[in-house]
Image: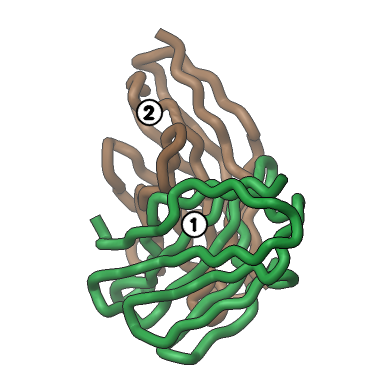
Chain colours: A brown, B green
Amino acid sequence: AQSVTQLDSHVSVSEGTPVLLRCNYSSSYSPSLFWYVQHPNKGLQLLLKYTSAATLVKGINGFEAEFKKSETSFHLTKPSAHMSDAAEYFCVVKGGANNLFFGTGTRLTVIP
Amino acid sequence: DAGITQSPRHKVTETGTPVTLRCHQTENHRYMYWYRQDPGHGLRLIHYSYGVKDTDKGEVSDGYSVSRSKTEDFLLTLESATSSQTSVYFCAIGRGETYEQYFGPGTRLTVT
């Protein structure tokens, strides 16, 4: 079975400082993993995806994530937070029938 | 923009009444999905479709039915709405080689 665990429900950073959002996954086979972002009262936008190619994946808006099989992790990072990064972030693993299993989300607050 | 629209965008209904939500896509994708989003749960899959008249249940399908008579439309029906079905409902399409999902803007449903 596939699942993800987002280790922090809320992360707060100052503008200009690094962002780290943590995600561990569980999968019975080589996983496809995603990060989605949801701004307040908006839909979900795909940030980046890992599909067994390069382990370091670059996404939109300066975000990237590293797939670490030995740690079963897929943490999302950004070198310097911007006010517009304030949103909810979801780590997601793809299951059978191309279904997605979502984590419970991490709310990122950026302090000016 | 994945060309996905949802209607209505907001609806308030009374317990026991039937409700149908519509998802429309303009890009002729085979896979379509319905999710609900609730605080503390992320998104959970209700039903999905892998072609016209081909549908299957997701994680939280009780109390919901779906239909897909045309490629572009995927309908979600609550036969007799309950207060526990108050939620935000998102439709998604699966696109690309890895079937990553792209989401519609959501429908906020309140059952009183």
Chain where mark 1 sits:
B
Instruction: Give the residue drawn at x 44%, y 54%.
Output: B8
Above or below, B38 against A92 in this view is above
Instruction: Determine whether, in the image, residue A110 is placed left or right of residue B80.
Output: left
Percent across and percent down for residue B101 are 40, 64
Helix, strand or loop status at disc 1 = strand
Q: Which residue is mark 2?
A: A85
- Residue A14 visible in the snapshot: yes
Percent across and percent down for residue A10 are 61, 28
- Residue A71 visible in the snapshot: no
Residue occupying the far top of the picture:
A112
Instruction: Determine whether, in the image, residue A51 is placed left or right of residue A102.
Output: left
Instruction: Give the residue drawn at x 40%, y 58%.
Output: B6
- Which of B35 and A91 lies nearest the eye of the viewer? B35
Q: Which mark is residue A42?
A: none
- Which of A80 and A103 lies nearest the eye of the viewer? A103
Q: Which mark is residue B90?
A: 1
Above or below, A18 against A78 in this view is above
- Which of A18 and B30 lies nearest the eye of the viewer? B30
Percent across and percent down for residue A59 are 30, 47
Residue B89 figure quarter: bottom right
- Kind of residue sitting beneath label 1: Phe
- Which of A103 and A72 lies nearest the eye of the viewer? A103
Above or below, B84 against A38 in this view is below
How far is disc 2 from disc 1 in space, using C-alphas? 22 Å
Badge 2 and badge 1 both on one subunit:
no
Percent across and percent down for residue A97 are 52, 81
- How packed mark 1 is, by other alpha carbons closer than 10 Å (few <14, some 14-19, many 20 or more), is many
Chain where mark 2 sits:
A
Instruction: Give the residue drawn at x 32%, y 62%.
Output: B4
Classify the position of the C terminus of chain B by image quarter: top right
